[in-house]
Amino acid sequence: MYYVKSTPPRRPRRGRTPLPESERKARLIQTRVDEDLDDALRDAAKQRRVTVSQLIRNVLEDTFTLVDNVVADAAALTATVKRDAKRVADAARGRVRDPLEAVEAWQEVIVGKDQVCARCGNALTRGARALLGVVADGSARPWMCLPCSTQL
């Protein structure tokens, strides 16, 4: 006579049902925190109606975004400070820089507000065709009237 051993029925898992494999995150990171931080995280998650894990993911993502923005802003600020320091140094030495030296290209535009030609000083009135200087160093973009543009 053969006996078939039956397995006892599985106990249901506690808590929520697990997510399908396709919706699970790729990696699991675990860390230990002290009781005060644990309480603060749980309270913050409860206030925001998210899980502690989601709160921590959001904080990490926001922190990296913030750091990236700070680095980019610092680079832009450094370039601006360098440019301004060079202008101040040139002015202190009595050197006056021609604003047309910084122009890398000219774009023909229709003037939206009254301007002044950087070469001859003539007025450029609203609606007139003129050239606007394209500069890369952040200096002021000079305007030029069409008659002066023939001398480029």
Image: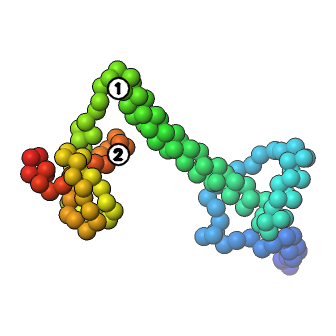
Q: Most extreme residue toward the bottom, as rendered?
A: 1
Residue at left 85%, top 47%?
37
In this view, the residue in front, 25 or 87, is 87
Q: If the image is split into quadrants, where does the N terminus sit?
A: bottom right
Q: Name the residue carrying label 1.
A: 90
- Name the residue: 81% across, 44% down: 32
Residue 116 as seen in the image, left or right of residue 36: left
Residue annotated with mark 2: 140
Q: Residue furthest top?
A: 93
The answer to whether residue 85 is left or right of residue 66 is left
Q: Is 87 left, or right, of 76 in this rendering?
A: left
Image quadrant where residue 42 sits: bottom right
- Numbered disc 2: secondary structure: loop
Q: Position of residue 93 (x, y in %)?
A: 34, 20
User: Please, what secondary structure does the residue beneath circle 1 have?
Assistant: helix
Residue 22 image offset from top left, x and y in percent: 60, 70
Disc with the residue nearer the chain's start (1 vs 2): 1
> Dot 2, crowdedness within 10 Å: few (<14), some or many (≥20)?
some
Q: Is residue 76 above or below residue 113?
A: above
The reply to whether discs 1 and 2 touch (Cβ–Cβ < 8 Å) is no
How packed mark 1 is, by other alpha carbons closer than 10 Å (few <14, some 14-19, many 20 or more), is few
Relative placement, left or right, of 88 versus 147 is right
Type of residue at label 2? Ala
Colour scheme shown: rainbow
Q: Tell me if I can see residue 102 in this picture.
A: no
* Residue at x-position 72% and y-position 61%: 54
Residues at marks 1 and 2, CA–CA distance in whole angstroms: 16 Å
